[in-house]
Amino acid sequence: FSVINRRQEPFLSMKRMLINATHPEELRVALVDGQRLFDLDIESSTREQKKANIYKGRITRVEPSLEAAFVDFGAERHGFLPLKEISKEYFKKSPGQIEGKINIKDVVSEGQEVIVQVDKEERGNKGAALTTFVSLAGRYLVLMPNNPRAGGISRRIEQLKEAMNDVQTPKGMGIIVRTAGIGRSTEELQWDLDYLVQFWEAITQASEERKAPFLIHQESNVIIRAVRDYLRQDIGEVLIDAENVYEDVLSFVRAVMPTFENKIKLYKDEIPLFSRYQIEGQIETAFQREVKLPSGGSIVIDPTEALVSIDINSSRATKGQDIEETALQTNLEAAEEIARQLRLRDMGGLVVIDFIDMTPAKHQREVEQKMREALEIDRARVQVGKISRFGLLEMSRQRLRPSLGETRSEVCPRCEGQGTIRGIESLALSIMRLIYEESSKEKTAEVRAVVPVSVATFLLNEKRKQLADIEALQKVSVVVAPVPNMETPHFEILRLRQDETSPEHISSHQVAQEYNAREEDNTIEVPGTEKPVREQAAVKAIRPTAPAPSAQQKPATASAPEEGLFSKLGKKIAEFFSGGEEKTTEERDTANRNRNDDRRTQRQDRRKSRVARDDQRSGENNRRSGGDRRQGGQQSRSDDNRSRGRGGRGNQNRQNQQDKPADNKGDNKSDNKGPDNKGGDGRKR
């Protein structure tokens, strides 16, 4: 295999895919252009990704009010299956037998088993969104096996329609052509489709062997997904720093896309791969709330429950000549960086951007256009609005996978995700009011306040008199128990009724110890819960029945004239000196000549029309310089060849030179100096 060492190599502006798999806990795939990171995907071994997985599930509840069913597919939370995502093959009644609006209770029932695919991952309290319209992603196509109406070709690749006309699509299935299918032959597209149909047959067969719920097919890991989805002609090389992952990727590429095999390289160097390309610092910005801009400004990204809010600050930006120019330049930089950060963090949903106020409408349109251009390379579907009169730009971005914050971050245990905590004095006063409220209830004997040390210090010193007044007025006992391990927003207030108090007195330090013992029991339970073992898929990777067609078939036809030219040149030179083997060479090249007969006839017709026009022109055209002299030479050679019946050696040589692609100019220059061309010049006279 290829081993690459880049100690002395300068960084070229080339797109690369870098795969870091040295730590099994975290697999990272980065796409870089030179040394600039423009896309990132991180997968954790502790968090199992369920999106695009295929399960056999069982409907546990049908909700007509939601027009949806809940499906047990093996996860902790049941999945959500809307009526519009249920294929008609699972309906108990055909739609023609139902009058009016379809009621979900009439078409599906509890206990029914269905094959479902995860459309959206679980988020917060929401279960996974499911669909029965399964889609299987291949290299060039996406197969929709139970959705014949789905499918089509992207508007950007209309030229694929000709290749798709000859692809045999099975009845009742739909296909979508991916962008990677540009320029692919019918044989390659048909091979990809046959492989996906073979895969779907294996899935349906496996679903009949067991009862629900169970995992039928698991989507590939992040590395195979990235190679399948991102590896294009513009990616110069794929560098992998782990040998076992390199072997997996190489075997996958050999089976599915053999033309890219030479781009897969193993990186072996002392310097870590991501440090070599200086992108570790850029990856860290994806975890930060504030991102600096080159001009000195900054953007602040705050994900909320409803949307992602992004604010732009000019900070130290002094790039422009006046305030308007500074605002425009900062906003243009921010638009480009925001598009990149949305890709790196994979943030989806609604995004609201608060740009710096710009008075001219021309500047606003310029920033909007810059935003659209920066989002063009995004694989997710993006909709961008216009800057409103309040200076806000609204946009929405498709959620391809859980965001980086959801997968690699944890909610802060102290503030519980709020971001701020209450001050000590405000918290102490609030606790004191709650103590008064609990003590004023009937039959209250004692109120215990378990609080952090700082809050207890404030209550027992600054508010000692008020606590004593509560005890005297309400005739209850107030116990303030400081706990060293407790931090400020947290506290606990316990109310003991008269029938709940024990005859023996419990001191305040014992109350704190009881709380500590209770908390330790809770913390011990969390690590004790073993990580669930990942379920093995019933259908894993299957081998295609036929080998992948070579994608070099098209380039081979382009290189055939070049090989024919050199072979013919050698034969013509030998022929010039010996002159006796023309018949034998013609027999060997019969196939090439037959292929070029039609083109030769067309060129000869064009020559005849050109000669007819040239007869009407003055003879000064033959003495023109530069490009006119070359044209005149060709015309005189055409006249000479017409008088000789167009059967001489020079005509064949000129024909081969015309067949040769125009980019081989260096070869033509060297060919003009050969002995064959000298003979041609002698005949031209």
Image (cartoon, rainbow, N blue to C red):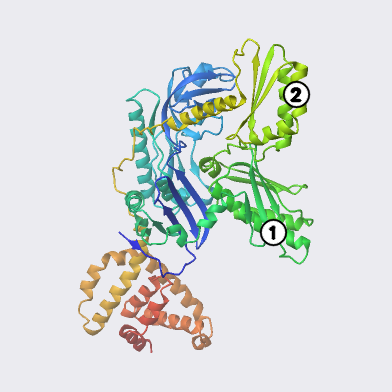
Circle on res. 220:
none
Where is residue 201 shown, x and y percent of the image? 34, 33
Rendered view: 652 above or below 146: below
Question: Which kind of residue does numbered mark 1 sit on?
Answer: Thr
Name the residue carrying label 1.
Answer: 330
In which quarter of the view is residue 5 placed?
bottom left
Q: Nearer the viewer, residue 30 or 202?
A: 30
Return the disc, 1 or 2, that comes first in the chain's sequence.
1
Question: Which kind of residue does numbered mark 2 sit on?
Answer: Ala
At 32% from the left and 73% from the top, the residue drawn is 565
Name the residue carrying label 2.
Answer: 468
Q: Residue at the far top: name it.
A: 499
Q: Does dot 1 land on a helix, a strand or a loop?
A: helix
Q: Nearer the viewer, residue 384 or 619?
A: 384
Q: Is residue 460 left or right of residue 251?
A: right
Q: Nearer the viewer, residue 470 or 602?
A: 470
Rendered view: 384 above or below 646: above
Q: Is residue 419 left or right of residue 228?
A: right
Q: Nearer the viewer, residue 385 or 644?
A: 385
Question: Mark 2: few, some, or many residues within 10 Å (few <14, many ≥20)?
Answer: few
In which quarter of the view is residue 637 placed?
bottom left
Where is residue 578 shown, x and y percent of the image? 21, 83
Task: For the N terminus, give its image quadrant.
Answer: bottom left
At 32% from the left and 25% from the top, the residue drawn is 209
Where is residue 214 shown, x and y percent of the image? 39, 27
